Amino acid sequence: MKKNQSQEEFIKGIWRDNPVFVQVLGMCPMLAVTNSAINAVAMGLATFFVLVGSSFLVSTFRHLIPKQVRISCFIIIIATFVTIADYTLLALVPKVHKELGAFIPLIVANCLILGRQEAFASRYPTKLAVMDAMGMACGFLLALLSLGAVREVLGDGALFGVKLFSENFEPWVIMILPPGGFLTLGVILLFFNWFKFRKDEFLEEVAEAQRSSH
Amino acid sequence: MDNLPWIFISALLVNNFVLTYFLGLCPFLGVSNSLETSFRLGLATTFVMLVTAICAWVLNTYVLIHAPYLRLICFIVVIASTVQFIEMLIKKLSPALFRAMGIFLPLITTNCAILGLAIFATNRGYGFWEGLVYALGAGIGFTLALVLLAGLREEAELSSIPKLIQGTAMNLIIAGILSMAFMGFAGLFSST
């Protein structure tokens, strides 16, 4: 049972409660850095590190943190991890760090991370909290990657810097500029809405069929 | 001193925080359902931005020279306490306004536009006045984007829109079109 529960916490972050597509959290880094797939992956990994690390600490010390100042405590823990991530990226991949620029420090203000600390890590044991954080971070990474890939393919005709089309492809430049971020995410959310609509309709039909058969 | 008007216009229109840097999207999408509240939130955010710019300058000049790696932690603590302070101040001075703002006031802490402002101003090496003007431009730009979207959304409420597209998807697409319109302002700088 225990194992099932931690598995479930992991899975739910990826699909059912996907932080970006379902809960619409953490939009700012989401849109700003997804103009190419490689930036999206770097951002996703940095967020993964910060989210898992701070969830681990917060949930380990959850009985020691006084209720009144918990938000400030969470923020300071998160800020510490973000500083580590910032300097690590600067040392390992200076080029990507330069392109992401101010958006690495801005992970601090990502509402997804603070939201998980408040809603989950500060209430549950360490193991569950880490699983939840990993699931959410994977979901975030997937969302970043899908948005980054779509925008890079349409706007630059490439994926991870590899050209996909022949010379005749005319890049849709608007997609890697700011408006493209809004439009792409809007269309993806539209798709999710449609999916949910279909599912609701299907469930209704099933309920209807059951009622008539009785 | 010559570049002050340019910094202002750049932060206000050309590099609008919401529509080109994607900062402060959470209140942008969450609060923009009525013109009245979005205008008030915009003003409160502008005020916090001005205070933050001053604090960031003081911190950068006197404290962080000795310990640059503490920058992020310092900024976030200063912002959080500023917001808390303003909240108490408004509660004392004008309880009516405090009630009208409700949950939005504490939420300004997690508005990345504020932290972004402090970081951008530091990265560009702005001095005191430049930082202040930059904060004013960014704040008014944020208010402008918020009010524009709120106006469009209020109009959209009255028209019949397919159920499928209602909600965040529609807001994002509206924001995309707004952002395209703001791209036109980029031409302001090409001649100089």
Image (spheres, coloured by chain):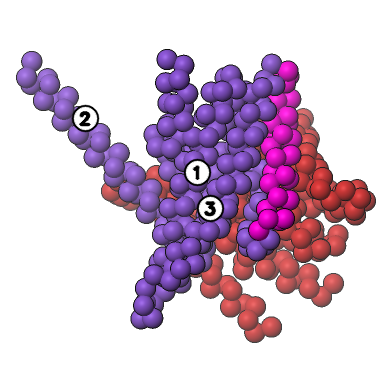
Chain colours: A purple, B red
Lower sequence index among marks 1 and 2: 1
Relative height, residue A91 to residue A164 (above, below): above
Which badge, 3 or 1, is on the more N-terminal residue? 3
Residue underneath mark 1: A140
Q: Is residue B71 magenta?
A: no
Which marked residue is nearer to the observer: mark 3 or mark 2?
Answer: 3
Q: Nearer the viewer, residue B5 or A74?
A: A74
Depth check, mark 1 against mark 2: the one in front is: 1
**Which residue in the structure is indicated by mark 2?**
A203
The reply, left or right, for residue A127 in relation to residue B87 is: left
Q: Nearer the viewer, residue A106 or A94?
A: A94
Q: CA distance from mark 3 to mark 2?
A: 36 Å
Label 1 packing within 10 angstroms: few (<14), some (14-19), many (20+): many
For badge 1, the amino acid type reads Phe
Q: Tell me, yes or no, whether dots 1 and 2 are on the same chain.
A: yes
User: What element does badge 3 sit on?
Assistant: helix
Question: Looking at the figure, which quarter contains the N terminus of chain A?
Answer: top left
Quadrant where the C terminus of chain A lies?
Answer: top left
How many numbered tags mark residues here?
3
The chain ID associated with circle 1 is A
| Mark seen at residue A205 | none
Image point (43%, 53%), residue name: A146
Q: Is B121 above or below relative to B26?
A: below
Identify the magenta region: A64-93
- Judge whether A35 appears above or below B154 on screen: below
Q: Chain of mark 3?
A: A
Amino acid found under the numbered disc labelled 2 = Leu
- Amino acid at the residue labelled 3: Val
Q: Which residue is mark 3?
A: A41
Mark yes or no: residue B130 visible. Answer: yes
- What secondary structure characterizes most of the magenta part? helix
Q: Same chain for marks 3 and 2?
A: yes
